[in-house]
Image (tube, rainbow, N blue to C red):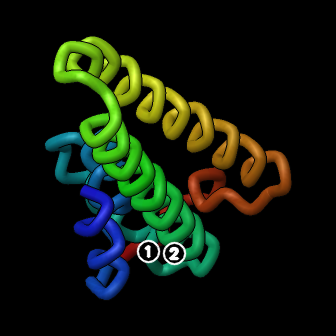
Amino acid sequence: MGLLALTSLAWRRPLLFYISRQFSAGEDPEANERFNALWQLAPARRTFRVLTIVWALGWLSEFALRVVMVLTLSVGRVLAISPFVFNGVTIGLIAWTLAYVRRRRARGQSPLDRPPLSL
């Protein structure tokens, strides 16, 4: 996932834009249209790129940690610890994301605080 996220920075829109849209708009066509309009705003593009980079680095770090665990610990210990590592990294990334978006909103930099653009 980390490599996919980094690769997605070369796409028209990075991976976290699409993941965020799914969580925010779901299958609602109007909500999807409003969310897609965010991409026209420079702060939104920056936000989604930063989110994608941080999540990519988090996923790559989690993978590296698992490799180290496999090379240094017994199979039983790796199997016992792995879910905690995965959940810890995921919860950490979610907490960071919420704090980052909250901070951007407090500074008036969140694209989600602006009215949607008409297409």
Q: Quadrant of the C terminus?
A: bottom left
Q: Nearer the viewer, residue 96 or 81?
A: 81
- Residue 34 coordinates in the image, percent (x, y): 37, 59
Q: Which residue is mark 1?
A: 39
Q: Quadrant of the N terminus?
A: bottom left
For the residue marked with disc 1, what is the amino acid? Trp
Q: Which residue is mark 2?
A: 45
For the residue marked with disc 2, what is the amino acid? Arg
Q: Is residue 31 visible?
A: no
Query: Which residue: 24% across, 22% down?
Result: 74
Q: Residue 71: name its quadrant.
A: top left
- Residue 21 coordinates in the image, percent (x, y): 32, 52
Q: Residues within 10 Å of mark 1 (few under 14, many from 20)?
A: some
Q: Nearer the viewer, residue 112 or 99?
A: 99
Rounded to the nearest whole Å, what is the CA distance between mark 2 and mark 1? 6 Å
Query: Which residue: 56% across, 66% down?
Result: 50
Q: Residue 15: name its quadrant.
A: bottom left
> For the residues carrying marks 2 and 1, which lies nearer the camera in this image?
2
Horizontally, residue 105 falls left or right of residue 65, namely right
Measured along the vertical axis of the image, is residue 18 above or below residue 3? above
Query: Which residue: 59% across, 80% down?
Result: 42
Q: Residues within 10 Å of mark 2 (few under 14, many from 20)?
A: some
Which label sits on residue 73?
A: none
